[in-house]
Image: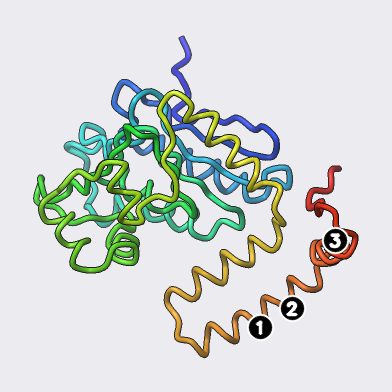
Amino acid sequence: MTADPVILARTQAHVLTLTLNRPDKLNAANDELLLTLTRELQAADANPDVRVVVLTGAGRGFCAGQDLGDVSGRDMTFTEHLHHTYNPLIRTIRGLGKPVISAVNGVAAGAGASLALAGDIRLWAASASLIEVFSNIALIPDSGSTWTLPRLVGYHRAFELMALAERVRAEDALRLGLCEHVFADDTFAADVQAYAERLAQRPAHALKLTKQALVAALTSGLDEALDQEAALQQLAGDHWEHEEGVSAFKAKRAPQFIREG
């Protein structure tokens, strides 16, 4: 018998949905899942038919973090493991030239919380939750959480969530800025698809440059950000999307930012 794939991939209306597929373990991550997901994202970046990527989980969990059984007894340091698996994945998400939606359908714990926070847009189901569980086993948050979480909620709240391993439920996640929207459980998949298709209709090249500018600005000063904006604005202005946007504005019609074929 062939084992079920650890990542399910489906493309509809220019939206690629990548589903973590270890539902019996709440999609806890092993090396195969992490490396396969990274490869799928890299392939999506090179695929012109894909305009938006959605990351979600099968079953009732988004990702329960590292599968500890997968690393138990392994002759590999923590540092080596992170450099081999999680760090390339997070760098791929943040550097992807397309919007990445984290569709958090259930619990996101540990490194799964880091993955949930790494998306450009975070959509949560009403029953979803997030927990920085690392301190419960006397480890520090990794896979980008120490970079992402304080930028969302501030240093002090981030430290409290990490130190006490407090579970954040959907209504509080929305209030804290850990997600942009919360959808009902029974319509979650359809709501996420509709949102992603709406995003896919936007100007892909301009959004790629917008993401590039935002990521750079997170670690730059004002002068650098202004220079980066000026350079990227030229690239945007020289692209056919800009011409289409201006033409549509003048004609008082909706712009068509997708060219098939």
Among the two numbered marks 3 and 1 on one chain, the one whose residue lies closer to the N terminus = 1
Q: Amino acid at mark 2?
A: Gln
Foreground: 254 or 36? Answer: 254
User: Disc 2 versus disc 1: distance between alpha carbons?
Assistant: 7 Å
Contact check, label 3 and label 1, Cβ < 8 Å: no
Residue at point 23% right, 68% down? 155
From the image, which quarter does the C terminus lie in?
Answer: top right
Q: Is residue 85 visible?
A: no
Question: Residue 244: which numbered mark, if any?
Answer: 3
User: Badge 3: few (under 14), some or many (20 or more) residues near its Cα, within 10 Å?
Assistant: some
Residue 189 lies left or right of residue 202; in this view the side is left
**What residue would you read off at disc 1?**
230
Contact check, label 2 and label 1, Cβ < 8 Å: yes
Mark 1, secondary structure of its residue: helix
Mark 2, secondary structure of its residue: helix
Contact check, label 2 and label 3, Cβ < 8 Å: no
Q: Amino acid at mark 1?
A: Ala
Asked where in the image residue 74 lies, by quadrant, the reply is top left
Residue 233 image point, x, y percent: 70, 76
Among the two numbered marks 2 and 3 on one chain, the one whose residue lies closer to the N terminus = 2
Q: Nearer the viewer, mark 3 or mark 1?
A: 3
User: Badge 2: few (under 14), some or many (20 or more) residues near its Cα, within 10 Å?
Assistant: few
User: Disc 3 versus disc 1: distance between alpha carbons?
Assistant: 21 Å
Residue at point 44% right, 23% down? 186
Mark 3, secondary structure of its residue: helix
Question: Residue 234: which numbered mark, if any?
Answer: 2
Looking at this rendering, what residue extends furthest in the top direction?
1
